[in-house]
Amino acid sequence: MRQKIVAGNWKMNGSLADNEALLKEVVAGTEGLSGVVCCSPYPYLFQLQGLLEGTHVAWGAQNLSQYEKGAYTGEVSASMLKDFGCSYVIIGHSERRTIFGETSMTVAEKFKAAQEAGLIPILCVGETLAEREAGITEAVVGEQIDAVIGYSGVEALNSAVIAYEPVWAIGTGKTATPEQAQDVHRHLRERIALMDSDVAGKVPILYGGSVKAANAAELFGMPDIDGGLIGGASLVSRDFCDICRAMG
């Protein structure tokens, strides 16, 4: 059975006081569950380590550098994230691709850097509204996943998580229907299976894009959807805990 995961992506939000209250409520509200992850901005990773170490909740970062060390002002390496106990790191989120110009090759390099340091990458793929309306969703997400497989090999997905996030549904209040999401998840799994069916059967594929407590159970009930990458709702403890419990 594939691992179910719900990962919260706080994006550029948080404060020391707010984080402490949120994390304590998440730990209490998801007691007995596995696969709960919180990904904070870099400055708060020390706080997450202090509050979550020894609990069932894992933590991670939202990005990293593809470089190990050196003259890269403002960058953060995979080994630095490991120093703060991170297990996960989000790679290739659409906001990194569209706002900060990360290419599929850059994402592939970051994916490899994460794994070489012992981190589990949460690899994000997804299409824009224009790409969906043009009927090229499968080609777009296929190119994004192929870049990583081409650079690290399909076996690398044995130690990774994929997150399908349609760009048009992130922070917009719009959500892909469970059937629309399932179609893309199935395509990704079938594409991987052409290279290695064992890997395809094991890799968790999460859905992200305006997931809420009200729609989480229906989304997570689809056969190829293994949980969610949660944005805004991950900042509200009751909502996030409800979504986590929808994993079943």
Image: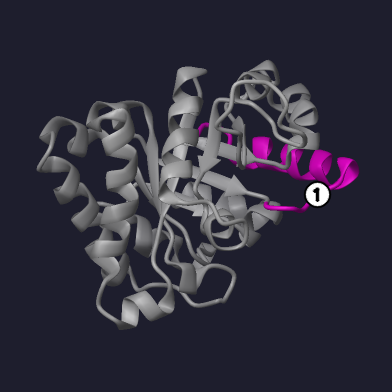
Q: Secondary structure at mark 1?
A: loop
Quadrant housing residue 48: top right
Which residue was labeled with disc 1?
A: 14
Residue 68: x and y in percent read 60, 21
Quadrant housing residue 242: bottom right
Residue 40: x and y in percent read 69, 41
In the rendered structure, does residue 206 fall within the stretch colored magenta? no
- Magenta residues, start to end: 11-33
Q: Is any part of residue 1 visible from this angle?
A: no
Q: Is residue 189 above or below residue 161?
A: below
Q: 169 or 135: nearer the eye?
A: 135
Indicate the amino acid at tag 1. Gly
In the rendered structure, does residue 27 fall within the stretch colored magenta? yes
Q: Main secondary structure of the magenta part?
A: helix
Residue 29: x and y in percent read 63, 42
Name, please, the residue furthest toward the right: 17
Residue at 50%, 27% in the rendered image: 114
Q: Is residue 242 above or below residue 32?
A: below
Quadrant housing residue 183: bottom left
- Is 143 positioned to the left or the right of 229 in the image? left
Name, please, the residue furthest toward the bottom: 133
Residue at 76%, 37% in the rendered image: 74
